[in-house]
């Protein structure tokens, strides 16, 4: 009667504190430059080393520029953080993939693509979108800097066990509907707090039909529903994706691992604390209109009216629309946009670039559109070139940048100016998230591509 979440969590409990948290063993810790410096300082202050350095992997991604990475970073704060991570990794004997390293990229893109994230693991990072790694069948979640220090020192963490929730999506996704649309649809229904306190297992035929890249996108956005994390039970899609990757088991070890991984599923009679079911046929290409990821609608739909919003939410709804420059009840189709961003740990993988290229092929970038196309890793960038997607994109007037978090958040040079609209494949549309005063509309790579070639919000199904 156990859920998969129970099985993985309970297998990692070192000890349980009565009336308190579990001491949970962590299989993998990822460190980036923003949330780790104080954690390493804490180790120094106590005169201790990392307990299991071979379980810890470091790389900069938030502060890295996406042009001129072979030159020193100009912003002094960004440079200090990136340099500190390199120095800390060297001092404590940790694997570090620095800028221009062929294995560098966004940590949540590189982890799965190198086979560092594997089924049945517990994975943490000082970053909320660590939930991405749940796509391989792992329990993965973000932690704070003091908790990063805890894992560095002991390879364990004190953590309250979340409740379990299953979201089933049954049926077949329609034309032009992607995993990103699926996630935005769930948030529009459940709101950004609908899964608070839960760890979500995604299931159902529509989830099973997703590629590994699609699953990574879906799990990435779990945190935006308030969930502690989200994951998908491993299956043949998972095994095919992981086979032959740098850190995946090999030979007989691979065969043994797969046999064990096949047992990683919720029991047929497992009881979840909450269960919801949605139908894939109800999902259309989505776009956000407000200032949190739950404020989304079908791209061919309308902004809700005040009557559609519960009384307690109307003030914040009005404030969000005022910031975005939209009116209740209006259509978004045809609204002019200024920027398009393809990338982030949400949609910076090879499948996302294939999708974007499929729309822009034979077309031209609209005049006045600034487009940032940022692969999630150097490996993705190499794949883009190997598949000739760079030629397709260049012919349409686009250029590929160097890997990094880029315009997902205003911590590097890729900032959207105040008042400008950006159709973005990233994960958050908070006020100023992409730059002070910037206005973000979250969407899929297909919808972003449609806006890039038309200059306005466009239903991608019209261009497919």
Image (cartoon, grey):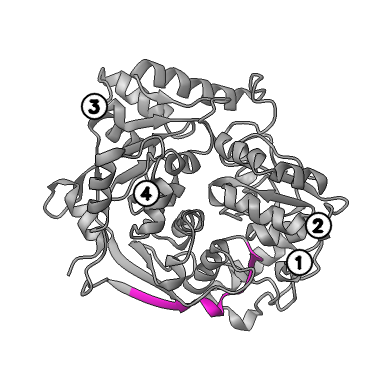
Callout 2: SS: helix
Callout 4: SS: strand
Circle 4 or circle 2, nearest the eye: 2
| Mark 4 to mark 2 CA distance (whole Å) | 37 Å
Q: Residue furthest right?
A: 367
Callout 1: SS: loop
C-beta proximity under 8 Å, tags 1 and 2? yes
Q: Earlier in the sequence, mark 3 or mark 4?
A: 3
| Mark 1 to mark 2 CA distance (whole Å) | 10 Å
Does residue 302 appear to the left or right of 179 in the view shown? right
Circle 1 or circle 2, nearest the eye: 1
Eyeballing the image, is 373 above or below 320? above
Residue 9 falls inside the magenta stretch: no
Q: Earlier in the sequence, mark 1 or mark 2?
A: 2
Eyeballing the image, is 339 above or below 412? below
Q: Position of residue 431 (x, y in %)?
A: 63, 53
| Mark 1 to mark 4 CA distance (whole Å) | 37 Å
Query: What residue range appears in magenta?
Result: 275-290
| Mark 3 to mark 2 CA distance (whole Å) | 52 Å
Q: Earlier in the sequence, mark 3 or mark 1?
A: 3
Circle 3 or circle 1, nearest the eye: 1
Q: Which mark is residue 463?
A: 1
Q: Which mark is residue 235?
A: none
Q: Position of residue 19 (x, y in %)?
A: 14, 55
Report crowding for label 2: few under 14, some 14 to 19, many 20 or more residues within 10 A (C-alpha): many
Q: Which residue is mark 2?
A: 453
Q: Which residue is mark 3?
A: 51
Q: Earlier in the sequence, mark 4 or mark 2?
A: 4
Does residue 330 appear to the left or right of 108 in the view shown? right
Q: Earlier in the sequence, mark 3 or mark 2?
A: 3
């Amino acid at each position: 009667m156990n859920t998969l979440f129970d099985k993985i969590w309970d297998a990692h409990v070192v000890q349980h504190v009565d009336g308190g948290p579990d001491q949970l063993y962590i299989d993998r810790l990822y460190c980036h430059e923003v949330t780790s410096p104080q954690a390493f300082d804490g180790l120094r202050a106590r005169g201790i080393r990392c307990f299991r350095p071979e379980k810890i992997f470091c790389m900069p991604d938030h502060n890295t520029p996406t042009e001129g990475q072979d030159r020193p970073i100009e912003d002094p704060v960004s440079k200090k953080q990136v340099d500190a991570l390199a120095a800390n990794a060297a001092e404590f004997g940790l694997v570090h993939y620095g800028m221009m390293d062929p294995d560098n990229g966004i940590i949540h893109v590189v982890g799965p693509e190198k086979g560092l994230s594997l089924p049945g693991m517990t994975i943490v990072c000082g970053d909320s979108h660590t939930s991405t790694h749940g796509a391989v069948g792992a329990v993965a979640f973000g932690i704070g800097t003091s908790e990063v220090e805890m894992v560095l020192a002991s390879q364990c963490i004190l953590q309250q066990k979340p409740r379990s929730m299953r979201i089933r999506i049954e049926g077949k996704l329609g034309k032009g509907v992607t995993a990103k649309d699926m996630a935005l649809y769930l948030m529009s229904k459940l709101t950004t707090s609908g899964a608070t306190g839960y760890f979500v297992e995604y299931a159902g035929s529509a989830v099973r039909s997703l590629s590994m890249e699609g699953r990574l996108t879906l799990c990435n956005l779990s945190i935006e529903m308030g969930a502690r994390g989200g994951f998908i039970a491993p299956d043949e899609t998972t095994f095919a994706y992981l086979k032959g990757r740098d850190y995946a088991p090999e030979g007989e070890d691979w065969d043994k691992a797969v046999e064990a991984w096949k047992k990683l599923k919720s029991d047929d009679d497992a009881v979840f604390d909450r269960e919801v079911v949605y139908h894939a046929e109800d999902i259309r290409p989505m776009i956000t209109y407000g200032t949190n990821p739950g404020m989304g609608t079908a791209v061919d739909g309308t902004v809700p009216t005040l009557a559609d919003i519960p009384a307690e939410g109307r003030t914040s709804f009005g404030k969000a629309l005022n910031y975005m420059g939209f009116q209740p009840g209006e259509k978004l189709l045809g609204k002019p946009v200024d920027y398009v961003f393809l990338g982030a740990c949400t949609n910076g993988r090879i499948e996302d670039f294939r999708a974007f290229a499929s729309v822009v092929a034979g077309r031209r970038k609209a005049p006045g559109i600034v487009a940032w196309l940022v692969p999630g890793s150097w490996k993705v960038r190499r794949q883009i070139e190997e598949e000739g997607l760079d030629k397709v994109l260049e012919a349409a007037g686009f250029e590929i940048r160097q890997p990094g978090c880029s315009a997902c958040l205003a911590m590097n040079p890729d900032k959207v100016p105040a008042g400008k609209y950006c159709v973005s494949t990233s994960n958050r549309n908070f006020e100023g998230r992409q730059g002070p005063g910037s206005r973000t509309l979250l969407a899929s790579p297909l919808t972003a591509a449609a806006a890039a070639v038309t200059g306005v919000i466009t239903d991608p199904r019209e261009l497919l």
